[in-house]
């Protein structure tokens, strides 16, 4: 993934099931900067009761 000049990025994802979904971002670093790892977990609700309008 390519980041913006300020280091931010955006992802779009649809988790396959309810429960906790964890995303991990890893940057291996460079000769000038140390690497970094970040992790965030989101709760995903069960939305199986929702039905599409016909």
Image: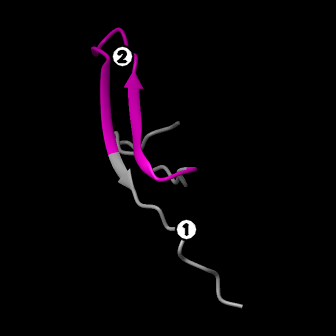
Q: Is residue 33 visible?
A: yes
Determine whether the residue tagged by mark 1 lies in a helix, strand or loop.
Answer: loop
Which residue lies at the image location 40% right of the left edge and 16% below the top edge? 28
**Farthest-out residue, bottom:** 54
Closest to the observer: 9 or 50?
50
Number of the label disc, if any, that sits on residue 48? 1
Q: Is residue 47 above or below residue 52?
A: above
Sequence order check, earlier mark of 2 and 1: 2
Which residue lies at the image location 65% right of the left edge and 89% below the top edge? 53
Which residue lies at the image location 64% right of the left edge and 82% below the top edge? 52
Counting from the top left corner in percent of width and height, residue 12 is at 52, 54
**Farthest-out residue, front:** 49
Closest to the observer: 6 or 24?
24
Q: Report if residue 28 lies within the magenta region.
A: yes
Counting from the top left corner in percent of width and height, residue 19 is at 42, 48
Question: What's the coloring here?
Answer: one colour
Q: Which residues are magenta?
A: 16-41
The quarter of the displayed image where residue 27 is located: top left
Mark 2–mark 1 distance (CA, rounded to whole Å)? 41 Å
Counting from the top left corner in percent of width and height, residue 11 is at 48, 49
Residue 2 as seen in the image, left or right of residue 19: right
What residue does disc 2 label?
29
Determine whether the residue tagged by mark 2 lies in a helix, strand or loop.
Answer: loop
């Amino acid at each position: 993934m390519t980041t913006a000049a300020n280091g931010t990025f955006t992802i779009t994802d649809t988790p396959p099931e309810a429960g906790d979904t964890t995303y991990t971002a890893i940057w291996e670093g460079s000769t000038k900067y140390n690497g970094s790892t970040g992790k965030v977990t989101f709760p995903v609700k069960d939305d199986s009761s929702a039905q599409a309008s016909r």
